[in-house]
Structure formats: structure tokens, C-alpha cells
Amino acid sequence: MKVTIKDLTKRFASRDKTGETVTAVDTLSAEFESGKLIALLGPSGCGKSTMLNMLSGILPVTSGKIYFDDKDVTELSPDKREVGLVFQNYALYPHMTVLENICFPLKIKKVRKEERIAKAVEIAKMVHIEDYLKRLPKELSGGQQQRVAIARALVKQPKLLLLDEPLSNLDAKLRIEMREEIRRIQRESGVTTVFVTHDQEEATSISDYILLMKLGVMQQFSATRDIYNNPANLFVADFIGNPTINQIHGVYVNGGIKPDGSDEIIPCSIKANENDRVVLAVRPESVLFEGGQTTGTVNDMYSSGKDWLVNFNIGDTELRGYCDADYNVQEGSVIKVGFRDKGQFLFNEETGERY
Amino acid sequence: MAEKKVRKYKDSDEKITAKSLITPFLFSFPFMVGLLIFTVYPFIRAVLLSFMEDYRFLSGKFSGYGLGNYTAIFNDPNFINALKSTTKYVLIVVPTSLAISLLVAVGLNSVKKLQGLFQTAYFLPMVTSATAVGMIFRWLYDFDYGLFNYFLGFFGVDKIHWLADVKYTMASICIYGIWSMLPFTIILLLAGLQNIDPIYYTAAKADGAKAKDIFFNITIPLLAPTIVLTSIVNVMSAFKVYDSLFVLYGAKPGPAFNLYTVIYYLYDQFWNKNKLGYAAASAMVLFAIIALFTLLQNLVTRKTNYYN
């Protein structure tokens, strides 16, 4: 099912008694393609959970419209929207067994008992929890609870599956395992899925599309690969990628950037207005340690397995780049570096907009 | 030689030694003294007393130990009446007050504004003196000017001699009992309701559940431990009913000595009839009944622990 969001806005009354409102989601428009996995990404407080709750119908919208395919669902209650919801702490009913939990949405729909058990068992097999049907939630591990929560959301065959920070309660190893599981389950069921996360790595590793938000405003909505290779603004460039992108603040002069605290000019093929304050952003893997012409000083080096992560300075700016393990430098070495065109972006310092 | 087993405190590496026990002992000492003097000693005395035959209070003499007091009270129609009436009272008052409290608590829990005010209002009966409440109830039950008869008048029902007619003795003490049981029950249920994570309601709504489905499938089962706890505590306290007889009937068991309760019987044997042995024996019977419910509570509480 295709999801279309038009000028979606949510305002909350402020907690203090000034009577002011806080805008959690600001005139956001987007279209989620059918059968895709979409990540709502952003730092905490950016409105991504609010977005999800409006999609599910738990939270009424202030203004704007939500369409499922061509149907306006903006005013529909959660039960009429055919959405499956997975909560951050799973919210499994503690007094029901795994089977009863999965059956619950069908029980509410008054599906016959044999039929709902058959369906629940089928879904349980898909999420690999068929061996635990008789257990209570308290007798399950975090990962198993997560699977039950997904099964409960899927059993009513929702047209849209919504997951709110589904992995944040799991330990690091399980998180990676479960995110691949979510990917597999989503592929197998083919249901359009939206999941909320603040972890860019989680988002980039499993989603087809990423919608990045900041303070209620959509920053970029594009295919996962594009958001890394083609960030719309400085915030996006900074938020996506680990290690984070290098940022060199300076002035644009003579077709290059003069970094703060340095007299050299870094040549740059991207055009900006002369004397603009700019930020040159470079991905760590786009730093070249051979054939460059900008002078840098090495601060530190860390082994990251097959290659080294070099921490160095250009003027006042600290940067990081990857180099081959046989690259022969040490602390204090003066080096010449350059930047690849790919993974190099120029932004206006004041507005964050990309040139 | 086998190594001497060292006893340690639970969840701690500290060893239990005579020295380490001094501080906790000092802390609990004042309370323990009170408990020993006012609870443990009287209880042991009462157990002994219930087996002493022909005990005389002033001389402290008795003819010997035996089951005479027990056979005597079980042959006393007043005691049998007391057991029956008390059981009937428990069976009426506990479920009714629980049902009303549940309604009120669910209502209070969903009230957004002035919740504190309402909670205080419902808690008031608990801190009001029994005598004052008794006065008010005597007025409520008044044949000519009482509020109950006034309301019955609206429905065209004839006035009732609430306190004078023996047919209405049970009803009168039950209404009083239900009313006085409400605050404690409501507070406990409300606490139980507030302990339910609202995420379950949200989840149920997302699963398509309506208010009625949520109440029966989520609220009630999750409140079950609290419901069981309050019911059993209320059963125990209802078995000890006698204050209503005091305030409504001026220390008589009903207008025509028609409604004994176990505690009233005990009181009566002790103060009015000077049969201390009978009083002690009836106390032991009541103790056995209440102990049974305590055991039941422990059992059920373990069954309804859904968390950890």
C-alpha cells in the first residue's frame, strides 16, 4: 500500500503555562512507495515518533492529510486503518501467553477460534517463535519478545507496519541480528513498513528509503544510498555516516576554500560566491593521503582492521581519513592530503544549504 | 574436617555475625517490644484461655485444660447465628463494595481535572470518626426524617423501619458496611489501575479493541492481583464486623437481639456474660477462618504475578 502524506502538521500545547504551542511536525509531505521499508530518522525530539503515531491514528493530526493509497485516512481511528504497530518496549500483554498475544487482534475482530489459532501459528513460524507459544512474555528474552510483537502486528495482515524504535531495547549483538530479521520479515510479508530510529547506521543498513527529520522539519527524503552520497544540507551530511563527515569551516576565495587558521587554499571544484563563509564537508573515505597538496599534521592513528584511521589537522580543523596500513606516518608527521570529488560537498555556513 | 558454612546476607557478601546483627536489632527493638506486649503475648494468652475450663477472671483460677469452651459455643444458637450472619454479611458486602469501588476507581482514573479533589473526597470516610459516621447513618435510616426513606418516597415505596424492623437489620448493617469499605477499596484499586502501563491500552487500541474489549481483556486481568488482594483483605476485615451494631443499634446486636456477629458475640461473652473462655474460643474460631484466607491470598498472589 502506498502512503501519501500532505502538509502534515502536529502542534502540542507547551508544557509550561505560557500558552505557546510546540510544533512537533511541520508541514511535512512525502510519499512512501508500496512494499518498501522506510526509516524515519532523526535525533531525539525531532518528531519522528509523533509522525509514526499520526500514521497509526493514535495521535490526531493538527492539520494536513494522510492517504493510504487514494483513501483519506486522516480522521480514521487506529482500528479502521489496518495498521500493525510495534512499540519500543513491545507492549506485550503480560497476562497472555505468546499465542494469546498474537491472537488478540483477531479475537477482537471476532475471528473463529480455530481460524485465529491457525493464522497465529503461521505468523509465529514466520518470525521463528513457534516453539514458545505457551510461554508468558516474562519468560522470553528481549529478542523473542520483539518477534512476538512483530507477529502480533502482522497477524491481522495490516497494510502498513509501523515500528517505533524497535531495536533500542536490545543489546548490540541482538540488535544487528534483529534488524536483519526485520528486513527478512518485511521482505517475506511484502508489507509497506515504516520504522522509527535515531541510529543512522540502523537506518542505512536495512531501509530502502530514509526520511531524515530535524525539529519537526523534513531535511531529506530519498533512497538510502542517495542520502549518503547526495546529502541535501549540512545537517544531513553530518547526521549520516560513521565516522562522521569532516567539516572544514572557512572562506570561499579564488575557487577554493581558505580554512580558518590556515593560509593555504584548498582547491574545490564546487562553485560558491566569492568571500562566502562556507563549510567544506568530506567523507573520511574521500580523504587522499597521496597526490594531495594541502598541508596537514598527524595527531593520532587508530587501527580499524584492514586500514588506519588517521586523525590530522588542517589549520585549526581536526579531520579524519582512512589510509592503507602500509602508509608510513606517525604522530607529528607533516603530510600532504587531497580530497576526492566523490564524497566532497560544499555548504553555506550560515544556512547549511548545499552549493 | 568439613569447612564451616558461613552464612551471608541475601544479595550481599557481608557475613552474618553477632556484631553485624546488633544495629538491625536496635532499629527493630522499639517496634518489637510493642508487638510482643500488645500482640504476641495477648495472642498466646488467648489461645491458652480458650482451652481453660471454668476460668475465673478475678481469682485467675480454672478447673483444667479441655475443649469445653469450644463445645459450649458450638452448641450456643447465638454463636451459630453469629457465624451464619457474619458469613452472609461477608458474602454480600465484599462483592458489592468491590463492584462499586471498581466502577468508581475506573471513573476516577479517567478523570483528568480535579482528580486530587475527587480522590480526597472518596478517601474522607476512612478518616472520619466512626461515631460521627454512625450519627449520620442513624439520621439517614430515620423513619420520619431520614434521607433513605425520603428517596424511597420518590419511587412510591413505603417507608421502611430501617433500624426498628428485624427484617431490615442485615440490610442496614450491609449498607453501612459497604459504604465504609469503599474508600480503602477504591484507593487500592486506583493505585492498581495507575500501575497499569498505559502502553497496553494504546497497544490494544492499535489492535482494534474498543473500550469494552479493553476493559475486559486488559484492565480487569491486569488489575486481577489488586482485586484479589483487596477482596481478601476486605473478607478478613468484614469477618470482624461489629462496629456497625454499636453505632446503629446502641451496642445491641440488632433491635431485638436478632443479629449476632462473631466479634459481637465475643464482646458480649467477655463484657456482659463474663465468659472469658467462650470469648477466647470464639476468637480462635475467627482466627482460623481468617488464617485460611491469608493462606489463600498468598497462593493466589503468586499465581497472578505476570511480571518478572
Image: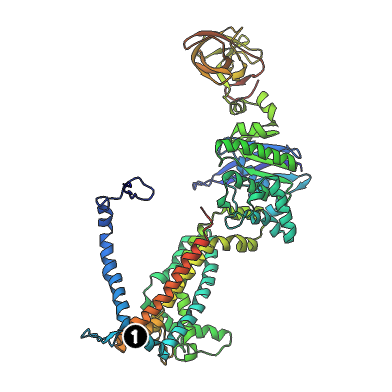
Residue A110 appears in the rendering = no
Task: State the residue at coordinates (65%, 47%).
Answer: A129
- Residue lying furthest front: B1
Front one among A275 and B299: B299
Near-viewer residue (A98 or A354) = A98
Secondary structure of residue under mark 1: helix
Q: Position of residue A236 (x, y in %)?
A: 62, 28
Q: On the rendered structure, is B129 left or right of B55?
A: right
Q: Chain of mark 1?
A: B
**Residue type at tag 1:** Tyr
Q: Is residue A24 left or right of residue B286?
A: right
Relative side of B28 to B81, left or right: left
Number of callouts in the render? 1
Q: Quadrant of residue B123?
A: bottom left
**Residue designated by label 1:** B278
Measured as percent of width and height from the top left, residue B119 is found at: 46, 64
| Residue B188 x, y percent position in the rendering | 47, 64
**Is A171 rendered above or below residue A338?**
below
Q: Is any part of residue B227 visible from this angle?
A: yes
Q: At 51% across and 86% down in the image, what residue appears? A: B149
Q: Residues within 10 Å of mark 1 (few under 14, many from 20)?
A: many
Residue at 76% x, 40% y: name it. A34
As displayed, is residue A132 above or below residue A200?
below
